[in-house]
Image (tube, coloured by chain):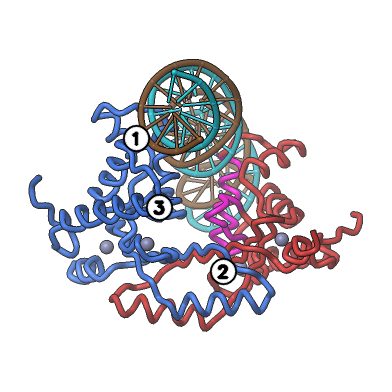
Chain colours: A blue, B red, C cyan, D brown
Amino acid sequence: MSEEHHPHTGHNHNDCIESALETAEQLCAEQGQRLTKVRRRALELIWESHRPLGAYQLLAKLAEEGFNSAPPTVYRALDFLLAAGLIHKVESMNAFLGCVHADKAHKGYFLICDECHNVMEFDYQDIHASLIARAAEQDFELRSETIELTGLCSACKKAGASL
Amino acid sequence: MSEEHHPHTGHNHNDCIESALETAEQLCAEQGQRLTKVRRRALELIWESHRPLGAYQLLAKLAEEGFNSAPPTVYRALDFLLAAGLIHKVESMNAFLGCVHADKAHKGYFLICDECHNVMEFDYQDIHASLIARAAEQDFELRSETIELTGLCSACKKAGASL
DNA sequence: TTCAACCTGTTATACTATAACAAAATAAAA
DNA sequence: TTTTATTTTGTTATAGTATAACAGGTTGAA
Ligand SMILES: [Zn+2]
Ligand SMILES: [Zn+2]
Ligand SMILES: [Zn+2]
Ligand SMILES: [Zn+2]
């Protein structure tokens, strides 16, 4: 596999992919879950993409490789990966991306760039605590959080300023 | 129009609808925007629903009343109302609900009950400030925020406990 | 080996949203 | 008031996202 440099950060993205796959194998083994071929390859393809991947984009890639190419195939894989905490869904984009710390239970908070469509996951415990507290004020028991912030990322801001 | 009591809070929801429509008229007048028949009725129908309304649910209601019943009709009305800040879209439900304080510029933060599907809008300045600060740490310029929390509302929690 | 649980294949369909162009209505300019 | 520009609506077609339902195959345990 050739080196793959992430457009914005410039890091060797292959390392991310490898490490994510290892973590996935490990977690599934621990929990008695089966990371089947199609599930594993789906996860890998999601990670290989530099931005969140739509279900049908993923389906096309899987189809190219000879996997069954009907929607349920990909949605089943996605459901599994979501349930296992290996990926997140970005609701405002109807797209999926690999979780950067699948080993820790957490909610995915995202910064989404309007320009380059890159997504960064962030995890701030203080915001989580504030949200729980605010919900509790209304006697609301929190279960899930969708936190998706859009705007301009650092790189695109610089690029825009120099025009 | 008969009195309409909101399922959870028990308040007379007609008052909400009336007041929302008045605010809408006023805001549109101020900004030189046209609150046409279909836009006005769409807003009213969204308010008449006790929970977020899907685009095609709205379309069906409009069709019953003799409005044109092709999707673009309803999506145009929704686009207008969104741009005017009169409604919000709940991304995780693909549904729309009336904004409770359309007169003030703000982001919609939502508490969504998994049981009854009621949605409460809340607006906490401190969370907003935290989010801006966290984004700034990454040199990210915030433009929009999607904050959608799900869980159990007060009423449903009580109902569940008594089973 | 037999059974049960789980995973995958397949077809059909439901739900959500936009493109593209024509016609009508409204507002502004002449 | 007529003309013109702008905005809104009508209409048809299509793109994009997601699930239902049932049949068939695999896996691992009893
Ligand atoms: Zn994550
Ligand atoms: Zn960017
Ligand atoms: Zn609001
Ligand atoms: Zn509830």
Res A59 label: 1
Question: Residue A52 location in percent, x, y?
Answer: 33, 51
Position above or below: B74 against B112? above
Question: Residue A70 location in percent, x, y?
Answer: 40, 28
Res A94 label: none
- Magenta span contains residue A89: no
- Quarter-of-image position of residue A9: bottom left
What residue is shown with label 2? B109
Q: Chain of mark 2?
A: B
The stretch of residues the image draws in magenta is B72-95
Q: Is residue B21 left or right of residue A92?
A: right
Q: Are marks 3 and 1 in contact (CB under 8 Å)?
A: no
What residue is shown with label 3? A31
Badge 1 marks a residue whose secondary structure is helix
- Quarter-of-image position of residue B156: bottom right
Amino acid on which disc 2 is placed: Tyr
Query: Which is nearer the N-term, disc 3 or disc 1?
Result: 3
